[in-house]
Structure formats: C-alpha cells, structure tokens
Amino acid sequence: MWAFHRGASVSENTGKKQFVEDLTDQGDDFSRWYNEVVRKAQLADYSPVRGSMVIRPYGYGLWENMQQLLDRRIKATGHENAYFPLLIPESLLQLEADHVEGFAPECAWVTEGGREKLEERYAIRPTSEAIIGHMYSKWIESYRDLPVLINQWANVMRWEKVTRLFLRTAEFLWQEGHTAHATEQECLEEVLRMLEVYRDFVETELAIPVYAGKKSDAERFAGAQDTYTIEALMKDGKALQAGTSHHLGQHFAKVFDITYQDEAGKRQHVWQTSWGVSTRLVGAIVMTHGDERGLRLPPNVAPVQVVIVPIWRKEEDKAAVSEFLVKVKEAIGPNVRIKVDDRDQYSPGWKYNEYEMRGVPIRLEVGPKDVASAAVMTVRRDTRAKESVPLAELGTRLPAMLADVQKTMFEQAKAFRDENTVLVTTKEEVIAHFAAEKRGFVAVPWDGTAAFETEIKEKCGATMRCMPHDLSRFGSLERPGHRVALFARAY
RNA sequence: CGGGGCGUGGCUCAGCCUGGUAGAGCACCUGGUUCGGGACCAGGGGGUCGGAGGUUCAAAUCCUCUCGCCCCGACCA
C-alpha cells in the first residue's frame, strides 16, 4: 500500500531518463521530496531570518487565490474584516491564565523602542484574542451591539523550535475570526458554522477531504472551552490539522470584562469564538496532491490554470503559430488564468517538465500541426491524458476540463484518505496499527478518559485528531458511554 | 529542547582522513545551429570554502566557539 512509484526513473522501454530530474522520490524520503518541491516550484525559499521563509510570487499567488475564495465565504456569513495591532502589551496577554501558559513559551518580545527600554514589553502577536478582547470590552455595552463578527487577515509569530516551510514557520499568514455573542447557543452555532465554512472551502477549493470534529481536552486551544477542527491526511500517511474553530466560552469575557446589558437590564458576559486557517494550507495542498513529478495544484486556486507552450521550427511556423495563438487566447476568454511561455531558450519538452513540476493543471501545446487542424493539444496534469480540442470548442471545453481536474483530484485524495482510514474496537488495536504501519487514520470507540489517549501517544506516537461529527462511516463503532475518536500520527 | 547529519560558485556535490596554486556536472552570459517530452557546438563570467577565534612558515582541510539548515523524537496553525 505504501510502495510509491519511483520518480526520475528509467523507462522500461526506452532506457531514457523520463521526467523530473533531481526530485527525490516520495516513497524514499517524503520530507525531502516536500522541501525540494516547495523550493523548485518556487513556492517559497529560506530567508536569513531563523525559521522564517519568503513566500515567492507563485506561492503567494496561490495564497491570494485561497484568501479570495475564503474571504468571500467569511463575508457571506456576515463577518467584516478589521485590523488590530501587531504588538500586544504583556499585561493584556497575561490576563487569561491558560492562554498565557499556552503561548508564553513561543512569544517573541519587543523590549526597546528607539533607544529607550520599554516600561512594559510587548509580545509580537502569536494570536490576537487578548488585544481583541480588550477592544471588545470597550465596544460592547448592550445586547443591541451583539453579535460582533470580525475577521482579521494578518501575520503572527510563534517562536517555534523546529520549523518547516509552510507547515510550521516562526512567522506565518492567516486569518483569525473573533466573534462575541449574547448566548452560548449562538456562540456554539457560530463555532460550527465556521467549521463548516472551512470544511466546504478546503474540500471544494483545495480538493482536500477532511474529517470535521471536536478535539479532546488534551488537544484543545489554550484558553478555549472546546476546539473543533478539520483534519486532512497527507500522502505520507500523517494527519494535518487544516483549520480550527474555538468555542471560547466566557473565559476571555471574564478576564477582559466584556459585558453587555441584556433586555432585562441585567449585566452579562458575552460568549466568544475564534477560528483560523493559515498558510499551512499551502503545505497541505503540496502534501495531499503532489506526486513523483512534483506539484499538482487544484485548478480553483492555481495561479496559472492553463499554460500554453507554443512550438515552432522554422520562421514561417513561428509566424503562423503566433497568429494562431491570438485566436486561441480569444477562444479561451478572460475567465481562465492562462500563461503563454514563448521563451526561446527552452525547448517544448523542457517546458512540459517544468510546468508539470510546478503543478499547472492543464497544458496546451500549440504547433504547426495544430494550426493546420485548427485545434490545440490539451494535456491534463492529474491524469496526463492528452486530447486534441478544436479551437471552436476551447471556450467551453477548457472550463469543463478544469472543473473535472478539480473533481478528479478531490476524488483521488478522498479515495486515498478512505483507504487509509481503518476501524478498530480497542485501544490495543490502535497501538498495534501504529506500531506496524505508523500511518493513516484509525477510528476507535473512546471511553472519554485521558489515560486512553496518553497510553496510545506514549506507546506509538499517535494522537487523537478529533471526534468526527459525521459518523456515517463509523456507525458500527458506536457504544453507550463512548465517543468515536480518530487517531493518527500528525504534523 | 534532546539524538544524529550537513554547511565549498545559483543548484547538486568532490576535495578534508594524510595542511601546500579551489574543482566537476548542471545552471548562467555571448554567438551559431535547434525546438511535438528536459537539444548541440564553440567561447565566457562567477566562490575571502556559513561566521569568529586559535594552532602553523602555510588552513576548505586540524582545534575551540558560534550561526543556520536537514532528519528522528518531545511541544504547536
């Protein structure tokens, strides 16, 4: 099951070197493959700042497309964007005990301004609950002010000991939603609404299937009452937390004194949520869809959806192909993100390999033969299927093909995830699974004790990822007094 | 933060053990021929060997410290 195809291999028939050179095989060393792909595809590069990376235009373009699609959903559910300061006074951060306890070890501090030592040091935000809680206490007075539904797109910093491109960097980009509600009921609805927004966004736009569910006490966010999560499975069999939505209860409201007068004139603490996804999702795309040739990007977020490679030998070909290209672009129309690579110094074959490595969903080859037949050759990245499409049909066929690539990628990822989700009935079987396989999700009836989780973690390194909401696949595991829990080794 | 590994042109690495003129392939630049799955020929440019200190007539090479990166574990989006 875990024998991957070898990349950069020698073809059995021709003996010629076949595709992407110098790319480590996924099965040989997945981590190394990941690092190489991220850098060779120019998503990101290391920077001189410890643990911090530079997101290059191609990677940032991917993030921008993700941002746009998610931002639309966040606004469609009634939220507004705002911006809070990067620096958080230590006194604010310290108000919520569990919160400080959770974040203190990874805070970076500003202790000087200009040449003066500060009276109170500032934390560079690891998250913004504290500063936002402080502001909410000023803004909220009456039940008429509720709910407050604010989102922020920002960078945050966590002084991580071990960093990895996109998956865990000291500084990263994300969005963090922070809402305040009059009742716990409304608050919980919001938490689940946003979890669903994340699930839909990640599955629909990133083509990454996830299990949505609730975290155990051991895994929940510092300062939260409950944490909900979406968990994805990477190709190496490890789980990745792809987004979280927190039910903060009244913890922050109490310490930041966020209160309102209800209709009866009585003063009440608000109920709060916070939820976020980060640039880690870029890493999730790479590790969910990538293959032995490199990246595979879901069309919905790919910076370039269709790359056009013109081909010519003689000068007269060049003129004819160039002329034809104008018609091709016109036929495609403005709704597809295209790129024409007419650089002369690279051969068509070189370009094919290059754009496959960079994950462009569809390639068009346009040469003299295509001009003659008034068609273009299309090649899909997901299936590598080649098909000649008449110029007249491009305008409708290309968007349909992109949609199909998107769908196929999701189905492939889902099939992989499902094949690697097993059901067992005892703790011992969970441990045995990870001791032997060390991969995939294992669903098991959980008695709700911390000892159960701890023993599994200590014996095989797997942690509880969530208690899934959708039990349609796990019905056979339901037991009185138990919850179905998913375990996995995780990033 | 523990255990292990690695820092030498842009990239992948050799040279280090046994100190003595910094190398190769790829990439890059120029010219020409090429172009439907990583083209070829000719010419050319580029590195104070991660950093600091030490030993030595002499350090990429030996010693000490330091920074960074990678892998495996413990903690986190």
Image: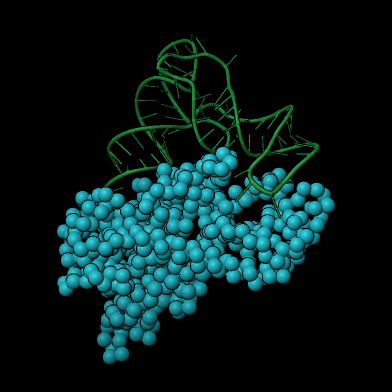
Chain painted cyan: A
At a point 67% along the width and 59% down the height, the residue shown is: A377
Q: Is residue A325 above or below residue B70?
A: below
Quarter of the image with the C terminus of chain A in it = bottom left
Coloring basis for residues: by chain
Identify the residue at the far right of this view: A316
Decide which of A391, A453 is in the foreground and name it: A391
Judge from the rendering whether residue A142 lies leftward or rightward of residue A208; answer left or right.
Answer: left
Residue A293, given in percent of the width and then of the height, sits at: 52, 49
Chain painted green: B
At a point 36% along the width and 77% down the height, the residue shown is: A190
Asked whether residue A424 is in view, the answer is yes
At a point 55% along the width and 50% down the height, the residue shown is: A357
Decide which of A351, A67 is in the foreground and name it: A351
Residue A244, given in percent of the width and then of the height, sits at: 36, 66
At a point 52% along the width and 47% down the height, the residue shown is: A39
Judge from the rendering whether residue A431 lies leftward or rightward of residue A20; answer left or right.
Answer: left
Judge from the rendering whether residue A371 lies leftward or rightward of residue A452; answer left or right.
Answer: right
Q: Quadrant of residue B48?
A: top right
Decide which of B1, A37 is in the foreground and name it: A37
Asked whether residue A88 is in view, the answer is no
